[in-house]
Amino acid sequence: MYDVALSVAAFVRTNTRADIAWMVSPQVSDQAVVFTPGGGRVGSLWNSAFDGMLADVANRQLSHGRYVEHVVTDLEAEVSGLASGTEVSFIVMPASQFPAGTWQWAIEREPLILTAHREGSEITNFSVQSVFDRDESANDIDMNRSHSDITDESVTTVLVDRKSTRLNSSHV
């Protein structure tokens, strides 16, 4: 997510449609890929192994995000390094659904808590908090590593950039 923050901030500032995709399972990727109408793309996930599938979701230009489950194919396994048959999950979310401060926090490489409430594959409510501004409900979350907690109702993703000077100079 940190790798595309500056580009997404520019898209948001100019009201350009952009959909951000990131992996939440089996492991969380600190990287993301951004899709814009007409086939534009910024960033990559897993050597772009899943870009076509994720672009198909983004090209639908839905008003809400989607939780996408997928099984790694043989070709995707060769490109990504993940084992064929591995179950993977992603979130694809319009940039317009992210709270206002998100991209500045990401540019500053602050650890983030992204919470997506869902009904099936549809994201019905989405929030982002900086760990430095988190509310009390997030106090029990492990902030030492990137990870996701996935339930039938929600996906909570914690993104921690180990290069963050603020994280390294603060006690979280």
Image (tube, rainbow, N blue to C red):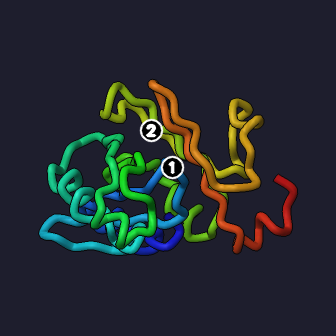
- Nearest the eye: 119 or 95: 119
Q: Position of residue 117 (x, y in %)?
A: 45, 31
**Amino acid type indicated by mark 1:** Pro
Q: Position of residue 57 (x, y in %)?
A: 22, 51
Mark 2 vs mark 1: give the one in front. 1
Residue that numbered label 2 is attached to: 126
SS category of the residue bearing label 2: strand
**Amino acid type indicated by mark 2:** Phe
Q: Quarter of the image holding residue 75?
A: bottom left
Quick check: 95 above or below 114? below
Q: In the image, 6: left or right of 35?
A: right
Q: Which mark is residue 26?
A: 1
- Spatial CA distance of label 2 from label 1 is 21 Å
SS category of the residue bearing label 1: loop
Quick check: 30 above or below 41? above
Q: Residue at x 69, y 30 (%)?
A: 137
